[in-house]
């Protein structure tokens, strides 16, 4: 059974930093791209970053570019999101998702975690 | 990276059919057949309902169907059931090798 479990969320002060994690199980983690999506309170889902299966390629939404870094440790089956210079607008539930794409099909996020809440407030 | 456009809300009675639209541009919805639809119950993990415009993952009811015309994709739910009440999001791959989501549609089953 595919499982994704996020952790590391919490309360952080404006301007602060935080790293959240996503531990994967039930599939060959090193074979899949992964992405992060967030949902601010009362708002919709917003894609923020993706990483290739070997970690060699990353991409970011303009809203987090230069402040967030996505990475992975395939030996630990773990995806990370390092967040810095956080502002109130970054308050959200952060979801990791497995990207189910091949050369002829792309499911986007085919399995998702339950999310971890990051609150930016003084 | 503008969000895809979805209606904020739709509603229907049990047994009826509803359709949710999702409008993008030629850089996303119109440029690829990689549109997905997600069902999201608050506090839970989003669930993939449709991928590649019209394909259903294993285990998803055939009451859910998808289509696309030009820059607009659509999700149709037939035979509405109470458990279908949720938020629905479309998503598309883009020319920037990123993804973009719609703003979400709240489905109310009357």
Image (cartoon, coloured by chain):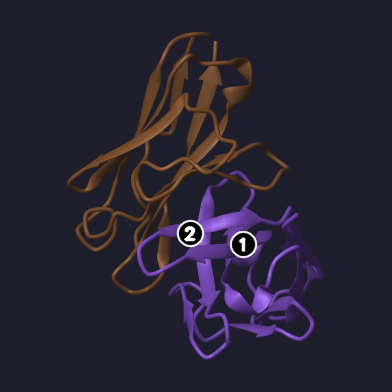
Chain colours: A purple, B brown
Which chain's residue wears label 1? Answer: A
**Residue corresponding to mark 2:** A108
Screen quadrant of the N terminus of chain A: bottom right
Expressed as whole percent of the image width and height from the top left, the position of residue A121 reads 75, 65
Q: Residue at x 36, y 41 (%)?
A: B54
Marks 1 and 2, the one that precedes in the sequence = 1
Taking the image as shown, residue B3 lies to the left or right of residue A37, namely left
Query: Residue at (75%, 78%) from the top-left corner?
Result: A18
**Contact, CB < 8 Å: mark 1 with mark 2?**
yes
Q: Residues within 10 Å of mark 1 (few under 14, many from 20)?
A: many
Q: Position of residue B38 (x, y in %)?
A: 52, 43
> Above or below — where is A108 with respect to B44?
below
- Please state if A86 lies on the left or on the right of B68 as rendered: right
Q: Nearer the viewer, residue B43 or B60?
A: B60
Mark 2 belongs to chain:
A
Question: Of A12 and B65, which appears nearest the observer?
Answer: B65
| Residue A39 seen from this side | no
Residue at 54 percent of width and 52 percent of height: A45
Position of residue A35 in the picture relative to residue A29 (left or right): left
* Residue A5 percent across, percent down from the top left: 78, 62
Q: Residues within 10 Å of mark 2 (few under 14, many from 20)?
A: many
Q: Position of residue B36 (x, y in %)?
A: 43, 49
Tag 1 secondary structure: strand
> The residue tagged with tag 2: helix, strand or loop?
strand
Mark 1 highlights which residue?
A97
Q: Nearer the viewer, residue A17 or A114?
A: A114
Look at the image and tell me whether residue B48 can be seen.
yes
* CA–CA distance in space, label 1 to label 2: 8 Å
| Above/below status of B26 relative to B9 | below
User: Both on one chain, marks 1 and 2?
Assistant: yes
Residue depicted at 64% across the width and 84% down the height:
A71
In the rendered image, which quarter is residue B69 located in?
top left
């Amino acid at each position: 059974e595919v499982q994704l479990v996020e952790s590391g969320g919490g309360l952080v002060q404006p301007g602060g930093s935080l790293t959240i994690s996503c531990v994967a199980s039930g599939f060959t983690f090193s074979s899949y791209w992964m992405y992060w999506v967030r949902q601010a309170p009362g708002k919709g889902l917003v894609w923020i970053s993706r990483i290739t299966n070997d970690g060699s390629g990353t991409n970011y939404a303009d809203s987090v570019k230069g402040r967030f870094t996505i990475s992975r440790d395939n030996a630990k089956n773990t995806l990370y999101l390092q967040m810095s210079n956080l502002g109130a607008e970054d308050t959200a539930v952060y979801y990791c998702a497995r990207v189910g794409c091949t050369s002829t099909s792309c499911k986007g996020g085919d399995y998702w975690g339950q999310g971890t809440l990051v609150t930016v407030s003084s | 990276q503008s969000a895809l456009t979805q209606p904020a809300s739709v509603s229907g009675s049990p047994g009826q059919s509803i359709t949710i639209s999702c409008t993008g541009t030629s850089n996303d919805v119109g440029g690829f057949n990689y549109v997905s639809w997600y069902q999201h119950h608050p506090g839970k993990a989003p669930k993939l309902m449709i991928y590649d415009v019209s394909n259903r993952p294993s285990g998803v009811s055939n009451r859910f169907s998808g289509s696309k015309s030009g820059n607009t994709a659509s999700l149709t739910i037939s035979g509405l059931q109470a458990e279908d009440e949720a938020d629905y999001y479309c998503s598309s791959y883009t020319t920037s090798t990123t993804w973009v989501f719609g703003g979400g549609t709240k489905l109310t089953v009357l």
